[in-house]
């Protein structure tokens, strides 16, 4: 980040430390990825599927109780209710 005349020496030092920490974290993450890839070798985690086959959801049979579906999702995902209340 170029030096701004509005930055104090302390802000510049903080920015330098932030960049250094980011670079170190990025380097560590990339090293972990390289080690994982080397250890995995040619093993695949997931089997590739045919690219020309399109997966589609099956239509729902009968009526959907939207109120019950909403209650079920709110009970299952309480953070949604918190965010909606904001």
Image: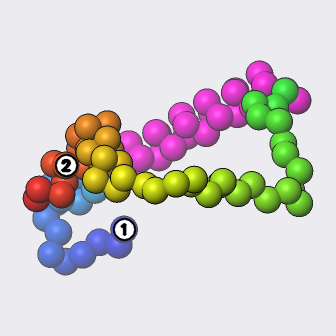
CA separation in Å, label 2 and label 1: 40 Å
Packing grade of label 2 (10 A; few <14, some 14-19, many >=20) is: few
Q: Is residue 23 magenta?
A: yes
- Residue matched to label 2: 81
Q: Nearer the viewer, mark 2 or mark 1?
A: 2
In the rendered image, the vertical position of residue 39 relative to residue 44, given as above or below: above
The residue closer to the viewer here, 51 or 76, is: 76
One can see residue 37 in this view: yes
Q: Which mark is residue 23?
A: none
Q: Is residue 80 left or right of residue 43?
A: left
Q: Is residue 29 left or right of residue 42?
A: left
Residue 64, x across and y down, in percent? 43, 55
**Secondary structure type for disc 2:** helix
The residue closer to the viewer here, 53 or 83, is: 53
**Secondary structure type for disc 1:** loop
Q: Is residue 34 magenta?
A: yes
Which range of residues does the magenta coloring cover? 16-42
Residue 67, x across and y down, in percent? 28, 53
- Residue matched to label 1: 1
Q: Main secondary structure of the magenta part?
A: helix
Which corner quadrant of the image does residue 44 belong to? Answer: top right
Check the image and name the residue furthest to the top: 39
Packing grade of label 1 (10 A; few <14, some 14-19, many >=20) is: few
Name the residue: 29% across, 72% down: 3
Check the image and name the residue furthest to the left: 86
> How many marks can you see?
2
Quarter of the image with the C terminus is bottom left
Name the residue: 46% across, 56% down: 63
**Residues under numbered marks 2 and 1 in contact, where contact means CB atoms less than 8 Å apart:** no
Name the residue: 38% across, 42% down: 21
């Amino acid at each position: 980040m170029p030096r701004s005349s509005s930055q104090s020496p302390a802000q510049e030092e903080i920015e330098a430390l932030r960049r250094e920490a980011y670079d170190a974290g990025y380097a560590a993450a990339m090293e972990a990825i390289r080690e994982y890839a080397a250890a995995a070798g040619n093993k695949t985690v997931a089997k590739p599927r045919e690219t020309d086959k399109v997966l589609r959801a099956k239509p729902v049979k009968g009526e959907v109780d939207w109120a019950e579906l909403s209650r079920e999702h709110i009970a299952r995902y309480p953070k949604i209710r918190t965010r909606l209340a904001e």
